[in-house]
């Protein structure tokens, strides 16, 4: 298996390189970084001042066999009826999308913490990749597949799959 991280818009190399290492370390597979040539602006809702997640997800295309694609966006994502989403996944195409926007301490008026930011981003990416394998939300609050209602949930869970979820990731 390989994971392709597709960047939607500008994201600093120092961030993507670190995510490449952390995600690759968890799945024990190669991770490739690509730039996705989709137009972020087309998914923008001027009333909500947010970007429609599902539209961007669809723009990522379909993954190849043995591949998982995760779009990385540094904008605020939403789906109708929810205030925002950290990410979204599509089982059929093997693709997912993650937003970095609400993962930084600065977003909440707190002091910058890059290590924490990268940890959260890794968990969100691993979680969405888990969904592309058909995994649902896990009741174990330490498992990466536990649902994050807020960042407190994200911070509580670990970057790894629990012993129930892990075997369902067929590499
Ligand atoms: Zn989920
Ligand atoms: Zn689990």
Image: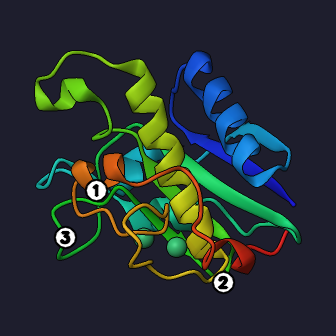
- SS at mark 3 in the image: loop
Q: Which residue is mark 3?
A: 82
Is residue 1 in view from this perspective? yes
Closer to the N terminus: mark 2 or mark 3? 3
Nearest the viewer among 72 and 9 is: 72
**For the residue carrying disc 3, how many other residues have a C-alpha within 10 Å: few (<14), some (14-19), or many (20+)?**
few
Can you tell which mark lies on residue 92? 2
From the top left corner, tell me how far across and down residue 87 is, in percent.
42, 59
Q: Residues within 10 Å of mark 2 (few under 14, many from 20)?
A: few
Mark 1: give few (<14), some (14-19) or many (20+) Cα within 10 Å.
some
Ligand 1's image quarter is: bottom left
Q: CA distance from mark 2 to mark 3?
A: 22 Å
Question: Which quadrant would residue 55 be assigned to in this image?
Answer: bottom left
Q: Earlier in the sequence, mark 3 or mark 1?
A: 3
The answer to whether the residues at label 2 and label 1 have Cβ atoms under 8 Å apart is no
Circle 3/circle 1 CB separation < 8 Å: no
Lower position in the chain sequence, tag 2 or tag 1 = 2
Closer mark to the observer between disc 3 and disc 1: 1
Q: Residue at x 77, y 66 (%)?
A: 63
Q: Position of residue 17 (x, y in %)?
A: 67, 25
Q: Callout 2: helix, strand or loop?
A: loop
Q: CA distance from mark 3 to mark 1?
A: 17 Å
Q: Secondary structure at mark 1?
A: helix
Q: Position of residue 157 (x, y in %)?
A: 40, 55
Q: Nearer the viewer, residue 121 or 71?
A: 121
Q: Badge 1 is on which residue?
A: 153
Is 60 above or below relative to 14? below
Q: Is mark 2 within 8 Å of ligand 1?
A: no
Q: Disc 2 to disc 1, how far (Cα)?
A: 27 Å
């Amino acid at each position: 298996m390989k994971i392709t991280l597709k960047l939607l818009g500008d994201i600093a190399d120092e961030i993507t390189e670190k995510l490449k290492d952390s995600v690759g370390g968890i799945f024990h597979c190669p991770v490739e970084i690509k730039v996705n040539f989709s137009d972020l602006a087309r998914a923008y809702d001027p009333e909500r001042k947010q970007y429609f997640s599902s539209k961007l997800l669809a723009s990522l295309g379909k993954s190849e066999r043995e591949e998982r694609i995760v779009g990385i966006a540094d904008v605020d994502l939403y789906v109708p009826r929810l205030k925002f989403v950290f990410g979204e996944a599509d089982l059929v195409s093997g693709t997912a999308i993650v937003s970095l926007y609400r993962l930084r301490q600065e977003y909440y008026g707190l002091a910058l913490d890059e290590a924490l930011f990268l940890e959260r981003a890794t968990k969100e990416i691993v979680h969405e990749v888990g969904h592309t394998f058909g995994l649902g939300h896990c009741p174990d609050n330490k498992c990466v597949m536990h649902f994050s209602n807020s960042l407190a949930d994200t911070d509580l869970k670990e970057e790894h799959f629990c012993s129930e979820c892990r075997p369902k990731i067929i590499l």
